[in-house]
């Protein structure tokens, strides 16, 4: 049995590298063309090439999303773009458009993956795309675990399931809230997330809601690490973490937690450290999470009715660049403000989570600093705890 | 061009049977929005030998497939309006593809997609209502595809498998029925009709679209669809008659005035505008 693939998002080259370093078997990215998430910092062709080279060096694959629903004016240049992506070393294209999927198969040797925007949630839908000639279908997030098992059992092609990240409240690809309310096209990358806005409720013309009973369509984010063993046993090909716009810290922490859970299951047949991995994810989340539809119809526990639930973004302070075992000096690239004499957490893909005390902080010339407050500059301090390059200080 | 009208209630048929050419009957538990009290056998009997299109346009979960297959097999003399490619696949297997109208609402927005699906041999295909009419026309010219297109009524803008109203009732402690529910976003004045059932939650645009002025340019459509959700059958029948007058007598101005007299909230939707999206140039 092939080992299940852990597929991670990456909004830029740095995130791609961290996703791979922290355990992703494949990453999905957006190019500058035909990709949703128009506000995500999508990749140029040069960046895609560099990303592919990096990922391939570590045995990981790169999938590129071309998942907009094209209007007539968008049609030009698809084949040329696909061929350019292939030349960059891209392994697979994720698309909702059957036209793009067929062009991938006709003109390149890349795999063609059906995007969740096609909202395939049953085995006959998978069979349609099997006969169409694609390599993989990404299931809609409305499938329960039992649905996924049945669909997997009846299907010949690869099946990918979402396991973590944001959830559309609507059936994916079918939502026109953003189009109608803001003229921003959700299916072409402009989703205004109108489902997360607040609404009053009227019945027969009379308002029945008040400030304490605001209606919203928003669901909690998805977190299904507790279903890892069932996903593996069901024979799912790939597990997808959503969130190309999420932070580097989020990607590293979430990917690493799933990586460890998957590896532990393959090694032991169970995941005894599940609680630890769930907590690792919690440390990086800034929205409440649930298991979505995996247990069946969603209930009040999977919905969000108040923005009060949102917790502050859990930023990280810096990234370890170097550690000298003899002098105990660690060099850190600053990402957010931190002060001397503070206690922080070291998050390492090798040694897990460790509390460390920061004493004095120095710049690279040896001048003592009152604080580390210049992002992307290097500072140093000493710690007895061994650090590794690309560990995260948070 | 056939005028296809929606049928949600058995009692609608009396008003609509004389004005429609074909009738889209929304089947309980198999379509998105439906009236749970619709008696399908009775509706089919009343419609007799008129062309019936069975609305079974929800997105189906795995456990619903056996029932769907059985239903399509049993009702194979009728046409089907579907939006799920799983339902399309079942129709292929049952040899019913030429009885299927495939309308995924939002997903077919260009001539290449239309041409691709046209090769499957559907009775008709629905293009998105979120693209300009000029694109609909040019896509038809390029493909010659058989098309269904909504020319009047409300358009759905949100379809969720989540039972959001039941969950909201639990959250708020409020209790209310299935009819007359509207949402209003806090920063807006528009009210959006909302429906719910066992299959999920559905929100419609705040206005009705009307392409009355374009009807003489839309003669290439196989089906001009009239959606009657939130309207009485009598009003819908009136509207269909007004459209007929506009086409037959070519007296567009009178027809427009009659439509205005019905005092409905009518707009032209995306007929003359495209959504916001800036495509970056690709240097080949």
Image (cartoon, helix red, strand yellow):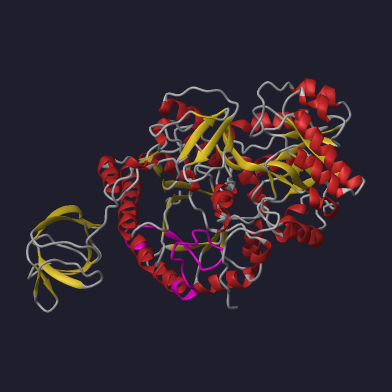
**Where is A179 relative to B239, above or below?**
below
Asked if residue B142 lies in the magenta stretch, the reply is no
**Where is B246 relative to B35, above or below?**
below
Expressed as whole percent of the image width and height from the top left, the position of residue B62 reads 58, 35
Position of B70 with respect to A27 (left or right) is right
Q: Residue at x 30, y 47 (%)?
A: A281
Residue B23 seen anywhere in this rendered image of the structure: no
Q: Nearer the viewer, residue B22 or B284?
A: B22
Asked if residue A43 lies in the magenta stretch, the reply is yes
Expressed as whole percent of the image width and height from the top left, the position of residue B47 reads 84, 26
Q: Nearer the viewer, residue B127 or A330?
A: B127
- Quarter of image, res A209: top left
Main secondary structure found in the magenta portion: loop
Expressed as whole percent of the image width and height from the top left, the position of residue A256 reads 31, 53
Q: Nearer the viewer, residue B214 or B125?
A: B214
Q: Residue at x 60, y 78 (%)?
A: B284
Expressed as whole percent of the image width and height from the top left, the position of residue A2 reads 45, 51
Q: Residue at x 78, y 29 (%)?
A: B234
Position of B128 with respect to A309 (left or right) is right
Residue A250 seen anywhere in this rendered image of the structure: yes
The magenta segment: A20-47
Q: Residue at x 57, y 39 (%)?
A: B191
**Where is B6 relative to A336, above or below?**
above
Considering the image in quadrants, where does the C terminus of chain A appear? bottom left
- Considering every residue shown, the one lying at the far right of the view is B249
């Amino acid at each position: 049995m092939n080992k299940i693939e852990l597929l991670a998002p990456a909004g830029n080259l740095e995130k791609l590298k961290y996703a791979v370093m922290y355990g992703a078997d494949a990453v999905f990215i957006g190019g500058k063309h035909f990709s949703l998430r128009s506000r995500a910092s999508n990749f140029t062709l040069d960046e895609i090439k560099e990303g592919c080279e990096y990922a391939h060096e570590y045995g990981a694959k790169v999938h590129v999303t071309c998942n907009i629903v094209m209007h007539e004016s968008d049609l030009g240049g698809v084949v040329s773009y696909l061929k350019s992506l292939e030349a960059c070393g891209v392994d697979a294209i994720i698309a909702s458009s059957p036209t793009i999927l067929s062009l991938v198969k006709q003109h390149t040797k890349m795999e063609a993956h059906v995007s969740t925007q096609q909202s395939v949630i049953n085995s006959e839908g998978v069979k349609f795309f099997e006969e169409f000639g694609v390599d993989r279908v990404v299931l809609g997030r409305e499938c329960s675990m039992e649905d996924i098992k049945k669909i997997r059992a009846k299907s010949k092609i690869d099946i990918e399931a979402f396991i973590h990240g944001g959830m559309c409240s609507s059936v994916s690809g079918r939502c026109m809230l953003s189009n109608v309310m803001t003229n921003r096209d959700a299916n072409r990358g402009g989703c205004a997330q109108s489902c997360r806005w607040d609404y009053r409720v009227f019945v027969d013309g009379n308002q029945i809601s008040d400030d304490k009973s605001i209606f919203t369509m928003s669901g909690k984010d998805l977190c299904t690490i507790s279903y890892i063993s069932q996903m593996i046993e069901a024979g799912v090909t790939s597990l997808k973490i959503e969130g190309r716009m999420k932070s580097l810290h989020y990607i590293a922490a979430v990917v690493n937690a799933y990586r460890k859970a998957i590896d532990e299951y393959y090694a032991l047949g169970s995941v005894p450290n599940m609680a630890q991995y769930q907590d690792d994810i919690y440390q990086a989340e800034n929205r409440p999470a649930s298991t979505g539809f995996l247990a069946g119809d969603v209930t009040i526990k999977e919905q969000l009715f108040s923005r009060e639930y949102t917790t502050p973004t859990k930023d990280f302070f810096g990234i370890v660049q170097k550690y000298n075992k003899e002098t105990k000096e660690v060099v850190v690239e600053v990402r957010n403000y931190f002060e001397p004499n503070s206690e922080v957490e070291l998050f390492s893909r090798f040694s897990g989570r460790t509390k460390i005390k920061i004493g004095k902080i120095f710049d690279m010339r040896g001048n003592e600093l009152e604080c580390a407050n210049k992002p992307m500059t290097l500072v140093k301090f000493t710690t007895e705890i061994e650090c590794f390059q690309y560990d995260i200080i948070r | 061009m056939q005028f296809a009208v929606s049928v949600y209630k058995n009692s609608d048929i009396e008003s609509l049977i004389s004005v429609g050419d074909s009738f889209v009957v929304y089947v309980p538990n198999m379509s998105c929005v439906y009236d749970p009290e619709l008696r399908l056998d009775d509706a089919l009997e009343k419609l007799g030998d008129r062309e019936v299109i069975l609305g079974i346009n929800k997105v189906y979960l795995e456990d619903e497939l056996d029932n769907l297959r059985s239903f399509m097999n049993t009702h194979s003399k009728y046409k089907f309006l579907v939006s799920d490619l799983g339902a399309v696949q079942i129709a292929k297997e049952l040899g019913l593809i030429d009885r299927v109208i495939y309308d995924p609402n939002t997903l077919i927005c260009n001539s290449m997609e239309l041409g691709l699906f046209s090769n499957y041999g559907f009775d008709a295909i629905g293009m998105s209502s979120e693209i300009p009419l000029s694109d609909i026309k040019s896509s038809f010219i390029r493909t010659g595809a058989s098309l269904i297109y909504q020319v009047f009524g409300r358009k759905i803008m949100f379809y969720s498998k989540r039972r959001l109203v039941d969950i909201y009732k639990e959250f708020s402690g409020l209790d209310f029925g299935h009819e007359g529910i509207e949402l209003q976003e806090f920063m807006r004045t528009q009210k959006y009709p909302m429906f719910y059932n066992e299959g999920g939650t559905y929100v419609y645009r705040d206005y009705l679209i009307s392409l009355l002025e374009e009807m003489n340019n839309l003669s290439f459509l196989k089906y001009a669809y009239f959606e009657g959700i939130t309207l009485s059958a009598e009003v819908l029948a009136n509207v269909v008659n007004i459209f007929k007058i506009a086409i037959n007598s070519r007296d567009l101005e009178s027809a427009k005035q009659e439509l205005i007299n019905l005092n409905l909230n009518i707009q032209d939707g995306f007929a003359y505008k495209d959504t916001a999206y800036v495509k970056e140039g690709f240097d080949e």
